[in-house]
């Protein structure tokens, strides 16, 4: 017999259902993901640390789990909400069922609830704290503990998901460049995408110092995705300002985009319910192209020139908005004109997700190629050269 369970939101709304995964209780921020595939990649994305993920797609678990699709060493979500879990696994790649994996890792979930109603509620009221419990079924007492649980606003979480020890992911085939990848919650597919382009990644802990970054001898720095409130990440922002001052090329995604924005002097703010899923339309303003992209963020950059997207002067020269969301005009990317730095608010590694944004890794590679040509020219001529623009022809 399946155990009963309830989900209680901080505003008091209650959703009864059945226990799914581990029996127990859990707390976190309730958010919804609109992806119709890729639930294993979602579950193992460190950016979901301390969040209870609601899957809007009704049928979850059909393909089970395997050892190839996970994006980190463990499941990071605080809780999991599905409508109709698969009764059996139907993929030849599966090594087990999703329900079993959730139980094995102690992840408390709930099934059999109206996820459409829950999603509409979160869209109207905003992402909020919640609890899932299959032990305490008293909505009143559970809600009180939800109200006493920590908020995502002000949460500094990158250090909780980052690697403790540096490690290296070697280039595939011919080695061309090396980068220092600051791990704020990096997904394993990201250094793989770089490796495919001949780039070796030295993955470093979130609390790394400027000396530790420079000691890798890397040609550039990559800023990964990650959880928490970027306004609380003062240490990484200070490091990034130091890096920008050295002229080191920088490429950031998701949380890394927010950190780069803060390093330029911009503020950040919490979105009402965030962007999460693999069907988010974004326009690259440098080319005019529209791409469908994978997102997982609840915070965004506050553009000083809003509602226009005119370039803004910063301590590091002019910075412009390179990408915008076509759903709500949220800033989805930055490009510095006077230092070699750019970033996007989404996930170009596409795990899981569409591959429209894969060109960003090529753009990063072209930036490094351009600087290599400049460096070679300086050695030959003994004088400085104008930096190349990695956007030309991209």
Image (tube, rainbow, N blue to C red):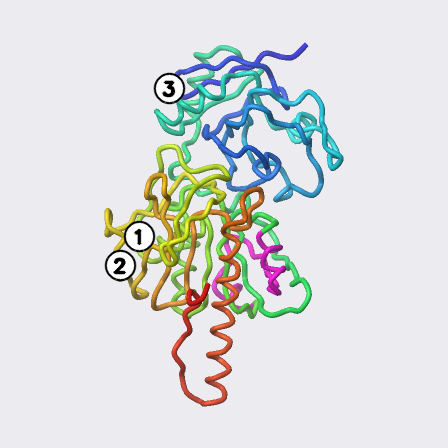
- Residue 185 visible in image: yes
Q: Residue at x 25, y 56 (%)?
A: 310
Q: Is mark 1 in CB contact (under 8 Å) with mark 2?
A: yes
For disc 2, the neighbor class at 10 Å (few under 14, some 14 to 19, many from 20) is: some
- Which of the 4 image quadrants contains residue 92? top right
Dot 2 or dot 3, earlier in sequence: 3
Q: Which of these two is toward me, 100 or 364?
A: 364
For the residue labelled by badge 3, is the local secondary structure a helix, a strand or a loop?
A: loop
Which comes sooner in the sequence, label 1 or label 3? 3
Q: Which residue corresponds to mark 1?
A: 266
Q: Position of residue 389 (x, y in %)?
A: 41, 69
Residues shaded magenta: 190-215
Query: Could you tell me how far apart the alpha carbons at marks 1 and 2 are, in whole angstroms?
Result: 10 Å
Can you identify the residue that label 3 sits on? 11
**Which type of secondary structure does the marked residue at label 1 adopt?**
loop
Q: Which residue does the numbered mark 2 point to in the structure image?
A: 312
């Amino acid at each position: 017999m399946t155990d009963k369970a309830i989900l209680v939101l901080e505003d008091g709304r209650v959703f009864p259902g059945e226990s799914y995964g581990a029996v127990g209780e859990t707390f976190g921020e309730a958010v919804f993901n609109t992806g119709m595939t890729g639930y294993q990649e979602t579950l193992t994305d460190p950016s979901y640390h301390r969040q209870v993920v609601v899957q809007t797609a009704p049928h979850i678990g059909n393909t089970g789990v395997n050892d190839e699709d996970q994006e980190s060493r463990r499941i990071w979500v605080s809780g999991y909400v599905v409508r109709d879990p698969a009764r059996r696994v139907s993929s030849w790649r599966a090594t087990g069922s999703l329900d079993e994996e959730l139980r094995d890792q102690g992840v408390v979930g709930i099934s059999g609830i109206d996820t459409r109603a829950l999603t509409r509620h979160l869209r109207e009221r905003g992402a909020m704290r919640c609890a899932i419990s299959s032990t305490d079924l008293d909505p009143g007492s559970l809600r009180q503990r939800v109200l006493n649980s920590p908020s995502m606003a002000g949460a500094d979480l990158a250090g909780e998901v980052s690697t403790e020890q540096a490690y290296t992911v070697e280039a595939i085939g011919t080695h061309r460049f090396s980068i220092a990848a600051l791990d704020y919650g990096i997904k394993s597919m990201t250094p793989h995408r770089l490796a495919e382009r001949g780039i070796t990644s030295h993955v470093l802990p979130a609390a790394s110092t400027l000396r530790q970054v420079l000691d890798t001898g890397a040609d550039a720095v990559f800023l990964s995705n990650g959880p928490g409130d970027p306004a609380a990440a003062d240490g990484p922002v200070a490091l990034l300002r130091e890096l920008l001052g050295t002229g080191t090329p920088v490429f950031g995604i998701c949380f890394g985009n927010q950190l780069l924005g803060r390093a330029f002097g911009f503020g950040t703010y919490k979105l009402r319910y965030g962007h999460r899923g693999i069907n988010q339309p974004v326009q690259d303003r440098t080319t005019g192209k529209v791409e469908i992209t994978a997102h997982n963020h609840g915070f965004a950059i506050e553009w000083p020139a809003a509602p226009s997207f005119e370039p803004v002067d910063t301590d590091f020269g002019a910075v412009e908005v390179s990408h915008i969301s076509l759903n709500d005009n949220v800033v989805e990317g930055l490009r510095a004109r006077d230092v070699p730095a750019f970033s996007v608010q989404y996930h170009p590694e596409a795990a899981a997700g569409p591959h429209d944004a894969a060109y960003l890794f090529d753009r990063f590679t072209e930036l490094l190629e351009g600087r290599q040509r400049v460096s070679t020219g300086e050695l030959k001529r003994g004088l400085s050269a104008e930096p190349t623009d990695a956007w030309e022809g991209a």
